[in-house]
Amino acid sequence: MTRDQEPTRQLPRPAATVLLLRDAANGPEVLMLKRSPTAAFVANAYVFPGGAVDASDTLALAHVTGLEDQQASARLDLPEGGLAYWVAAVRECFEESGILLAVDAHGAPVSAERAASLGVHRAAVNAGTLRFGALLEQEQLFIDAHSLAYFAHWITAPGRPRRFTTRFFVAHAPVGQLGSHDASETVDSRWISAQDALAACARNEIELVHPTRVSLEEIAPFERAEQIIHFARDRTDIVTNKPCWGVGREGKKLFRRGMPAYAEIHWCDPHEHGNTSYELIAGVPKTLDAYVTRLIAPNPGFMTGPGTNTYLVGTDAIAVIDPGPDLDAHVEAILAAGAGRIRWILCTHTHLDHSPAARRIKAATGASIYGRPAPDGRNQDPAFAPDHVLQHDARLPIGPLTLRAIHTPGHASNHLCYLLENTQMLFTGDHVMQGSTVVINPPDGDMIAYLASLEMLTQLPVTVFAPGHGYLIGEPHREAQRLIAHRLAREAKVIAAMQRLGPVDSDTLVAAVYDDVPAKVHPVALRSLHGHLGKLCVEQRVRGDASRWEWIPSHAEKH
Ligand SMILES: [Zn+2]
């Protein structure tokens, strides 16, 4: 199908929804409405009150206090028009539940009696015969924007009959206003705790769509409504949830944020054609974008996942990043995909699954090899002979593109990441992998250096990680932070186990510290355990060797 023949893709409409919260004996409850069986969008599901932003919502902006449009837009990461979402949340809440999140000219909340008397206007506002702004004007009421805290952002998957880009808010329910469904769009309403709603859904008693379920899961741990509002207010990391479609051997599949292929599908298919592959197949070149093609080597395994990723970067002249293992099929596939254009060969490091094919690619193409010499040690490619040794921050022009070397010791002392400055894609080699934890294997592996190198990535202008194994990884700064937190949590486990067990050998310690992974992984985990212990030894918190590790109590712990 050519692009001209495609059906017009539906753009999502702006919408707002609000989780109205009140404290009950067993914790916070949220107002949920059941959508009518004939509703065009999520029929029968229990949802929070909400709906599409209306053109008339901007007319009510004069009755919003507490936030300017510029601040509201910044909060929603929009160029402008953000404050209308606050209005839409309040208006839809009034239309669908009868609850009016408004204050009078003195800042006092609308009382239950007044809200009830204003109920006569619900139908008119709903029908559009009375503008919400006009109602606020007539009643001299105001929306206090601070009473609604922005909480989450969800976009409906492409291909659905109706699509919305919905901003979720949380707010305290006004005291005394209980609300009621409108008996047309919605046919039932209930105040329910997040746990009870999730349990009812699990028992198939009520239906919840995915964003509703995730929102309930997020608020479920809190004990008071106030805590949820604070959580939302303090949230600096609200990320768009935008499901996407990919194709593969199992047919067309939907991918949500958090699933391994999600970021890669978005990167490869920014216009939501839904025709990019969700599979990792060795030997088949995958075009990731205008500049980058990935070839997976046929070396799948415990340490290499689906196989080593080789990247071809450029247009008329190509750089090969991580040529991979010296396997005939892989070398031939690289030469075929590069088709006479390969000028540079860049290696992230010299483990045997990353650099050995460099020599044959060079022999076949005359390309120059870039990287850092191999250190001593097992699993190293001692014959690796770079024509050019790259220093940190070295820039290499690749035709019209620029690759910048970023020295990232930790997994390997000679490890480099490469930043394609034009798209801010970072080729991470084994510094960051998708789908498994990087092994830090001393003496060449160094946990202190590894954490510092991850910290450095959080300061780099990066939009996506292209790892040495697995799919592209989105939200790279968050991922780097997550990896740091994961290592520090593991370190805390090492310390706790040593304090509990007393002097201990490595085999006993690995079983205690890695009790959350299968025992067959323990031999590999042992290497990373030694990575942690190496760091703790340098920090003078631990001493010893594999036969006997001993915790050194700090001054504070002795007294
Ligand atoms: Zn490696």
Image: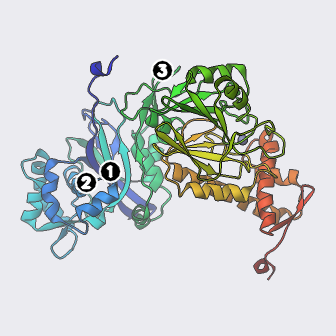
Q: Amino acid at mark 3?
A: Gly
Above or below, 154 relative to 226? above
Q: Is mark 2 within 8 Å of ligand 1?
A: no
Quarter of the image where ligand 1 sits: top right
- As drawn, the label of residue 167 is 1
Q: Position of residue 234 (x, y in %)?
A: 43, 65
Tell me the amino acid under the disc marked 1: Arg
Q: Is the C-beta separation of discs 1 and 2 under 8 Å?
A: yes
At label 3, counting other C-alpha atoms closer than 10 Å, the crowd grade (few under 14, some 14-19, many 20 or more) is few
Q: Which mark is residue 8?
A: none
Q: Amino acid at mark 2?
A: Tyr
Residue visible at 71% across and 27% down in the picture: 299
Element on which disc 3 rests: loop
Q: CA distance from mark 1 to mark 2?
A: 7 Å
Q: Position of residue 323 (x, y in %)?
A: 66, 31
Residue designated by label 2 = 85
In the visual, does 407 lie left or right of 544? left
Left or right: residue 108 compared with residue 326: left
What is the residue that sits farthest to the right in this orientation?
A: 547
